[in-house]
Amino acid sequence: MAATTPSRLDIARQTLDAWVREVVAWHFDPQTGCPFWLDWAARAGWDPRTGVRGYADLDKFGFFEDEWLRGGPVRRWVPRAHAERPVYVFETGGSTGVPKSRINIDDFRIDYEAFSATLPDEAFPRGADWLSIGPTGPRRLRLAVEHLAQHRGGICFMVDLDPRWVIKLLKRQEFDEAELYKRHVIDQALTLLRAHDGIRCLFTTPKLLEALCERASLRKLGITGVFCGGTEMTPQFHRFAVEELLEGAYFAATYGNTLMGLATHKPAEPEDNWAIIYYPPAPRAMTEVVYPHRPHELVEYGQTGRVRLTTLTKEFFMPRFLERDQAEREPPCERYPWDGVRNVRPFSQLGTKVVEGVY
């Protein structure tokens, strides 16, 4: 009887299991691992290098705790193999208390180079310049989008944007001041777009994209590709952007954060009904949709649940982190033979309202 040929899904699972073994071996080896996980293993009383043989075994770690990333010393996350290398630290939004911090060395470059391979050259021309209208300061986006532009042969122009200030204005209900700040950001963007006619590619958030298009035509400004991400990304906005705002420019929607990196959008098809569908950058990160009260268990395809994130790089290992997001579980597709997420939005059962500011 002839052996059956492994499917693309089987191969993806085997690749993921092999990568899990390699990453776990790295982070728990006293020569290469990071102090946090080496201390964790000593207290736990078992060696993950022998106890973890594949992705499913990561359940043995329990759930990664949010508070572990708040405060210092941040060097406890630096693998000993990278102790002598320059280290970046990137922060989460910081809208709730002390921001979470993640160390980076090369991860942001690797992630965005992989994302670059998904962008069509006709919309994001090689050698074209970029404009980033998004969070700056301690956020990963600041350097990541710039590296994306440079990797594709361009130069990245930036605006100054502090979303934490906008969040404070909104919490104080100073809506007029928040609107003035948004106008200030768009003023900066328009100045750059009109002064540098080589800019063809744009990164921004849904609210800022809408604000920009209220004041200028993307077509007249020469924009051919828009890379867009943020919590306001909904099917309604997706349709509005494509039909009203973009004027023929390509729309590359993304779901990402400091802890995961960047999930790639599935190109829109009519049967998707404008849903925003993302697939994680496996095997470097995996997103799953789980039952909120049984987070060890995946929901069925098409059902809604909480997003569970696992990050697997040699710089950062974060198993089974429960995000502040919910989504529908999406089945694998031809291009991405692993689970995706559909229509990500804030998790409704947290019982707290998160102010998203300019996003």
Image (cartoon, grey):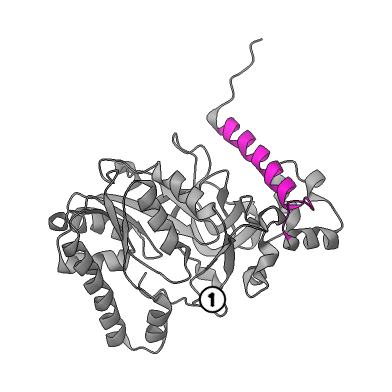
Q: What stretch is highlighted in magenta?
A: 9-34
Residue 172 position (above or below residue 281): below
Q: Which residue is drawn at 85% across and 53% down?
A: 46
Rendered location of residue 229, percent (x, y): 38, 59
Q: Residue furthest left?
A: 220
Residue 55: percent from left, percent from top: 67, 44
Q: Is residue 292 left or right of residue 182?
A: right
Residue 125 falls in image quadrant: top left
Considering only vertical position in the picture, is 319 above or below 57? below
Q: Quick one: label 1, few (<14), some, or many (20+) residues within 10 Å?
A: few
The number of discs equals: 1
Q: Which residue is drawn at 30% across and 68% down?
A: 207
Quarter the N terminus occupies: top right
Q: Is residue 197 left or right of residue 250?
A: left
Residue on which disc 1 sits: 351
Position of residue 38 in the picture relative to residue 102 (left or right): right
Closer to the camera in the image, 336 or 76: 76
Asked if the magenta segment contains residue 125, the reply would be no
Q: Which secondary structure class fits the magenta region best?
A: helix
Looking at the picture, does residue 78 appear above or below residue 93? Answer: above
Residue 160 coordinates in the image, percent (x, y) = 34, 73
Does the image show residue 219? yes
